[in-house]
Amino acid sequence: MKRVLMTISDFQDNQVKELEHIKGLDVIVKNKKDVCKEDILSVDAVVGNVDPALLQDAHLEWFQAESAGVNQYLGVIAPQTVLTCATGSYGIAISEYMIAMMLNIMKRIPTYFKDQEARKWVNEGHVISPIGKRILVVGTGNIGMEFAKRAKALGGYVVGMRRRKEEVDGFDEMHTIDELKEEVSKADVIAISLPASQYTYHLFNQEILEACKDQSILMNVGRGNVIDTSMLEKVHDRFLGIWLDVLEEEPLPVDSPLWNIDNLLITPHITGGYQLDITLEKLYKIVLHNMKAYAQDQEMISVVDKKWGYAKS
């Protein structure tokens, strides 16, 4: 019988019981903060985001992450370990935040909130609509596709960008990453949902940031190191607004100069949490499917391509 350590504590009791009773598995449920090296070495598979250091020298058959991003595990899991993630769980929740923040910037809502704090009754003037705007989605996985669907429903012209040239439903155009500089120069909104990898590190460097269309909107919900944030002090004035839910250093230090950039909105990496019940339900379905598949040696879903660091949606 295959032994599986399950460390996700957010599932409901009846869901945990269903997982515990999967035929062919001996499921050990433990809070991840209590997991030690001996626990890892005593099982064949782990479900849940444990400390990556615990996976060093562990010869697991399978590891299931509860996050869509798995860069923290790529360098530590054994080559033979099947790696699956939570791709497919977070698209709805994160894309709704993306739409909300895009509209907040377009309608100058943060400025009006500052006016309210200062007790100022001021009409801040001109605003814009997503109708007819060129919206560039950099990363067309589950999050990017869910955002594209919503942006298109609001009247945007949606352009996708990914590693390989192929058509993806819901996009008006598709381009490859090597066309990034040209595409950011034309985009009214640039929405990034890329994973962290050697290929995406500081993809948005000074050259690309300076090439972005004047008074465009820049948003990042993928991984913080996709943008060289040290450049934002130099280039922020060219943007109508910037929103970052992910940063290179988290938590962001209190003395970071990013706090002082007027047109930069920061949220503390909250879009991918379990605040939305749909997210946790989707994650549970992935875990349930993959645990049953593991027990029966069948095909899993959300399997990560270790070279590129993400799973196909």
Image (cartoon, grey):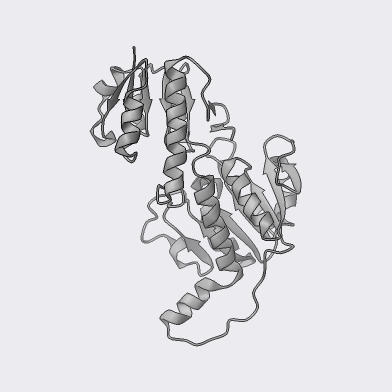
Residue 216 position (above or below residue 302)? below
Q: Is residue 78 visible?
A: no
The percent coordinates of residue 195 (x first, y second) are 54, 40
Residue 88 position (above or below residue 204)? above
The percent coordinates of residue 3 (x first, y second) are 32, 17
Q: The C terminus lies in which quarter of the figure?
A: top right
Identity of the residue furthest to the top in this view: 1
**Left or right: where does residue 54 sit relative to residue 157?**
left
Q: The N terminus lies in which quarter of the figure?
A: top left
Residue 66 location, quadrant: top left
Q: Which residue is drawn at the image coordinates 42% and 83% (left, top)?
A: 118
Q: Which residue is drawn at the image coordinates 53% and 38% (left, top)?
A: 88
Q: Nearer the viewer, residue 123 or 57?
A: 123
Residue 119 position (above or below residue 298)? below
Q: Is residue 143 visible?
A: yes
The percent coordinates of residue 234 (x first, y second) are 57, 62
Q: Which residue is drawn at the image coordinates 47% and 86% (left, top)?
A: 120
Identity of the residue furthest to the bottom in this view: 121
**Left or right: where does residue 20 sit relative to residue 184?**
left
**Left or right: where does residue 207 sit relative to residue 33?**
right
The percent coordinates of residue 165 (x first, y second) are 74, 36
Q: Nearer the viewer, residue 249 or 233?
A: 249
Q: Nearer the viewer, residue 123 or 240?
A: 123
Count of numbered marks: 0
**Left or right: where does residue 297 sit relative to residue 236?**
left
Q: Which residue is drawn at the image coordinates 42% and 25% (left, top)?
A: 63
